[in-house]
């Protein structure tokens, strides 16, 4: 009997067709056992082949652009300087670094800078400022009603100032330099 089983098993596994049949029977057995132990599942099936296409839940005529059609308008409290004036005044004070002490240079920046930026610039050597002249008016890029980037052309590059106005008064909160 053992010899018969040995010959049967070895002959079955020599044929590709026999291996395919054995694998098919195993798959069906596993699926059958799984259904047997899954119990009554009255939920909707994951794939519904007989239903109609779902109805859209949005209005196709509604404007759903993420970018608003008009840029945000900066807010300024009455009696305070406009963002362009603050950016220009800060840039002028920033480039006025020749033949002045670090304290004098820093004191000129303070009226138009946030406390955080003022603290960051407190130990800056004004001789390290890479520009000497402002070449034009700042170009404003509104990012919100209380945040603006101001690009200021300089003789040796571009100074980008991040202006913030949490309470309607514009101050420079960050600076970035790009050499030309």
Image (tube, rainbow, N blue to C red):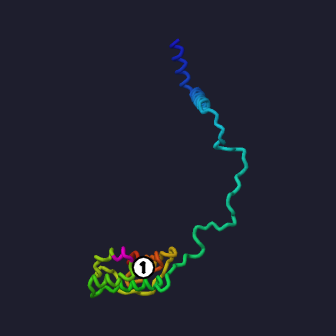
- Is 124 inside the magenta-drawn segment? no
Residue 24: x, y in percent?
60, 30
Binning the other alpha carbons within 10 Å of mark 1 as few (below 14), some (14 to 19) or many (20 upward) gives many
Magenta residues (range): 114-118
**Towards the viewer: 69 or 153:** 69
With 46 as the anchor, is 8 left or right in this view? left
Left or right: residue 90 versus residue 146 is left
* Magenta stretch: dominant secondary structure: helix
Total marks placed: 1
In reply to whether residue 115 is colored magenta, the answer given is yes
Image point (55%, 18%), residue name: 8
Residue 180, relative to residue 66: is it above or below? below
Residue 114: quarter of image: bottom left
Q: Which residue is under mark 1?
A: 171
Asked whether the viewer can see residue 1, the reply is yes
Outermost residue toward the top? Answer: 1
Residue placed at 61% from the left, 29% from the top? 36
Where is residue 3? Give x, y as percent: 51, 13
Which quadrant would the C terminus be assigned to in this image? bottom left
Locate residue 104 relative to residue 138 in the image: left or right: left
Where in the figure is residue 123, as x and y percent of width and height? 28, 76
Image coordinates for residue 122, horizontal then vertical, percent: 30, 77
The secondary structure type at the circle numbered 1 is: strand
For the residue pair 68 and 131, the one nearer the viewer reads as 68
Identify which residue is drawn at 40% across, 75% down: 174
Q: Which residue is drawn at the image coordinates 46% and 75% (left, top)?
A: 166
Visible in this render: residue 16? no
Q: Tell me where residue 126 sits by quadrant.
A: bottom left
Residue 2 position (above or below residue 152): above
Which residue is nearer to you in this view: 87 or 11? Answer: 87
């Amino acid at each position: 009997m053992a010899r018969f089983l040995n010959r049967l098993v070895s002959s079955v596994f020599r044929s590709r067709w026999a291996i395919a049949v054995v694998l098919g029977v195993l798959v069906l057995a596993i699926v059958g056992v799984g259904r047997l132990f899954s119990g009554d599942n009255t939920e909707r099936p994951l794939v519904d082949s007989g239903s109609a296409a779902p109805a859209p839940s949005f209005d196709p005529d509604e404007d759903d652009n993420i970018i608003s059609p008009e840029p945000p308008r900066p807010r300024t409290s009455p009696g305070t300087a406009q963002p362009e004036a603050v950016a220009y005044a800060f840039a002028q004070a920033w480039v006025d670094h020749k033949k002045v002490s670090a304290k004098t240079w820093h004191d000129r920046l303070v009226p138009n800078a946030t406390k955080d930026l003022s603290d960051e610039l407190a130990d800056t050597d004004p001789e390290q400022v890479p520009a000497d002249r402002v070449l034009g008016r700042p170009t404003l890029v509104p990012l919100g009603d209380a945040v603006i980037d101001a690009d200021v052309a300089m003789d040796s590059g571009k100074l980008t100032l991040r202006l913030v106005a949490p309470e309607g008064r514009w101050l420079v909160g960050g600076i970035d330099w790009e050499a030309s």
